[in-house]
Amino acid sequence: GAVVSQHPSWVICKSGTSVKIECRSLDFQATTMFWYRQFPKQSLMLMATSNEGSKATYEQGVEKDKFLINHASLTLSTLTVTSAHPEDSSFYICSARAGAFGTDTQYFGPGTRLTVL
Amino acid sequence: AQSVAQPEDQVNVAEGNPLTVKCTYSVSGNPYLFWYVQYPNRGLQFLLKYITGDNLVKGSYGFEAEFNKSQTSFHLKKPSALVSDSALYFCAVRDRGGGYNKLIFGAGTRLAVHP
């Protein structure tokens, strides 16, 4: 199957700093990438959807100025958590899809655990 | 609006026994349905999907799922459970409205397979 990587796998930062998480599709070109957040023992919450070369579409309640998403190429998307606070601590998972059709499979990265002190 | 429900928070099964993880959906039009598995501190792994065709879909690791249109269900099954199958399982439906065809996930079901 298709492989999606994330870097870093975990990060600890101080409150007020910014953290960048990378998501890469390794063996396919991803026209669309998704960013999710998962709290312990809960389902995935979609934060935003991005298409290569265009602005991300954020879900209701997600602060676009706080969670900056850049989909610079067909294999790379980044999520930057700006001015991080302890409540931003979470497990962030990206996902990538090769096509735009509903039948296309989404493949997920291994996740990044962010801890804000 | 599209939605998916997983009525069981946890399913317990003995190793070697058949397992079923339940999923029901609500969609307008034909559904696109997916199952994913998540191991601790990992992302989701794709198991299988139903788009059209045979109601019984076979996927990875010996899993299969049966699409039942009349009952609006897409239950995940495996004939003989392994301890290594213990994980968190998510059912998802494709949201075909609003663009981007994003996935809508159920709450997840934790499967515990006991030796």
Image (tube, grey):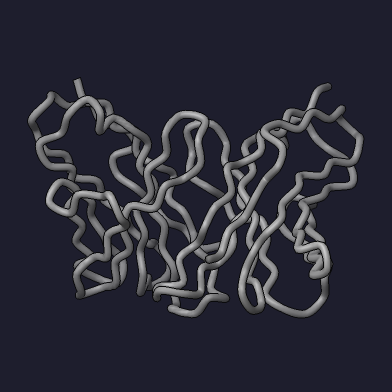
Question: Which quarter of the rendered picture does the N terminus of chain A lie within?
Answer: bottom right
Q: Is residue B72 above or below residue B111?
A: below
Work out whether residue B61 or residue B54 is closer to the camera in this orientation and state it. Answer: B54
Using the rendered view, name the quadrant where residue B11 is placed: top right
| Point 28% across, 49% down: residue | A61
How many callouts does the rendering have? Answer: 0
Q: Position of residue A19 (x, y in %)?
A: 16, 39
Using the rendered view, name the quadrant where residue B112 is placed: top right
Work out whether residue A9 or residue B75 is closer to the camera in this orientation and state it. Answer: B75
Asked if residue B31 lies left or right of residue A80, the reply is right
Work out whether residue A12 or residue A2 is closer to the camera in this orientation and state it. Answer: A12
| Point 57% across, 76% down: residue | A103
Q: Position of residue B50 (x, y in %)?
A: 70, 69
Asked if residue A86 lies left or right of residue B23, the reply is left
Q: Position of residue A22 (x, y in %)?
A: 26, 51
Work out whether residue A12 or residue B34 is closer to the camera in this orientation and state it. Answer: B34
Residue at the far front: name it. B1
Q: Position of residue B35 (x, y in %)?
A: 65, 55
Q: Is residue B68 above or below residue B113?
A: below
| Point 64% across, 35% down: residue | B87
Question: Which quarter of the rendered picture does the C terminus of chain A lie within?
Answer: top left
Asked if residue B79 lies left or right of residue B43, the reply is right
| Point 34% across, 39% down: residue | A112
